[in-house]
Amino acid sequence: MSDAERRDEAPSHFIKDIVRADLAEGRYREVVTRFPPEPNGYLHIGHAKSICLNFGLAEEFGGRCHLRLDDTNPETESMEYVRAIQEDVRWLGFDWGEHLYFASDYFDRLYEWAVELIKKGKAYVDDLSPEEIRAYRGTLTEPGRESPYRNRSVEENLDLFERMRRGEFPDGSKVLRAKIDMASGNLNLRDPVMYRIKRATHYRTGDAWCLYPTYDWAHGQSDSIEGITHSICTLEFEDHRPLYDWFLDALGVHHPRQIEFARLRLTYTVMSKRKLTQLVQEGRVAGWDDPRMPTIAGLRRRGYTPEAIRDFCSRIGVAKKDSVVDVALLEHCLREDLNRRAERRMAVLRPLRVVIENYPEGQVEELEAVNNPEDASAGTRKVPFSRVLYIERDDFMEDPPKKFFRLAPGREVRLRYAYFVRCTDVVKDENGEVVELRCTYDPATRGGDAPDGRKVKATLHWVSAAHAVDAEVRLYDRLFTEPNPDGLKDDFREHLNPNSLEVLTGCKLEPSLGSVEPGERYQFERLGYFAADPDTGPGRPVFNRAVTLRDTWAKVRARGG
């Protein structure tokens, strides 16, 4: 299939239509996009949407996508974040090849261009304080006021700017501003700041600079240097586009086209990097890769696959209008993916001991168990069955309600891949708590139905006690109790879910799970999808619940919601 045929087959959206038209009209000869995160934190699921969009467009139109780290704020940036960003982009399945760049690579060129604007009378050194600059800026209904330093001569501005570069002035005492229009209806054009004095050690350039460019100044010019054709941004940059264009036109350099799209907003989730940083720094989560975090590292540790995340980003589409996506859709995408690829295993998280009294002591049978009913090529495995088993404590009730069909005194159920068993007695401790069930089994029901045609209403999972592997299992839930924690007027931290993590020890797993590697994913039958955590060690598996089996999104869609 040709590139043109692939483009025609793929679902379209307004950005793709713009790119296609630009190529048809000859505005650009190739497509060059970029993903430009600031290395001041870990990437989250919102960034995944941008990654998929930028790299996906470049791939679809036979172009290239750059990875550029917009590192213009040395106080918050580090190599830790740079490495994490690269790992996340690669894990999602994208490759920038030789096109890895840093805004700090362009500090000399940006400085030279700033000097060029000063010489053109389009930039000046201002002595107003940050507070005074804000006051002079005006409001949406009132024009700004010109700084008393706005009409300095070109020579004076050049001298002051060079002295700023040499470090002759205190931090915050002077800035370089673009000279545009203090009466503009767009506040971003009211003489925006281009440079500020900041004595801070940069993680790449060290102490070579005490003068750092603002994002608005560095961003468009970095795009131009790299030959970007389509600078794709989220909607909050729409009001900055006239400034983006003004800088490029004032310099007369290559002019990419900026296009804005709606950022991802997800229920029960905060996407603000500032808020996520707070959660990490205050110890409210275990780190950037805490499985409750919406970071790509957190989702990966929880058990998400890159395929599920890419599928999610494809399904939510690209739009111009802000909307909120139900987190249940993200969970649905993971279920669909893991249903196809995850092998099934039996695990008992809250074990209750079962003794099958008429089963021969010391006997062990190897029963055939299906690895994945959705994938015949996954084959089968052997599961040991013996006289003493564990079942889930929730699968037994001494005095069950009418619609409880699992095990109860006198009731018969099926054990998965094994036999029908009937509860004949209940053993309790001194506190009256059930600690053991006594049962009998029907040898004629191995792996199938009863020969006499009797039926049971429940099938339970189980683990042989003598062969069980002890494990720790971490049950994760949503981090917030409110559907829109980012939009609340009060402190978002007040709505953290106190039950977002439950750690279970003494869980019993079938023996095949005794030597898992971190990152391996399984469906624990009847319980959900689980992934081996990096804390897993030899003979000590630790599993995270990635997602439950209950699919609320599928039910909503089935109802036409």
Image (cartoon, rainbow, N blue to C red):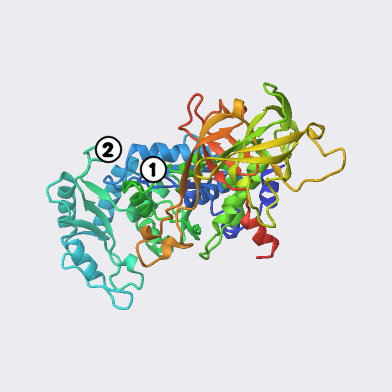
Residue marked by disc 2: 205
Describe residue 486's horizontal placement relative to residue 207 as left or right: right
Residue 379 visible in the shown view: no
Please provide percent x and percent y for residue 61.
60, 47
> Which of 465/109 is in front?
465
| Residue lying at the far top of the rendered structure | 362
Report the mark closest to the observer, 1 or 2: 1
Percent x, y of residue 523 = 63, 39
**Within-10-Å neighbours for mark 2: few <14, some 14–19, many 20+:** few
**Crowdedness of circle 1 by 10 Å Cα count: few (<14), some, many (20+)?**
some
Quadrant of the rendering where the C terminus is positioned: bottom right
Specify whether residue 339 is in view.
yes
Numbered disc 1: secondary structure: loop
At label 1, the amino acid type is: Ala
Rendered location of residue 528, percent (x, y): 60, 44
Outermost residue, right side: 452
Of the residues under marks 1 and 2, which one precedes in the sequence?
A: 2
Q: Does 37 appear above or below 464?
A: below
- The quarter of the rendered structure image containing the N terminus is top right
The image shows residue 178 at horizontal and vertical percentages of: 28, 60
- Three-letter code for the amino acid on which mark 2 is drawn: Thr
Residue beneath the point at 30% across and 37% down: 204
What residue sits 34% from the left and 53% below the top? Answer: 215
Asked if residue 552 is positioned above or below residue 453 in the image, the reply reads below
For residue 251, what is the image quadrant?
Answer: bottom left
Q: Which residue ends up furthest to the bottom in the rendered image?
A: 141
Which residue corresponds to mark 1? 286
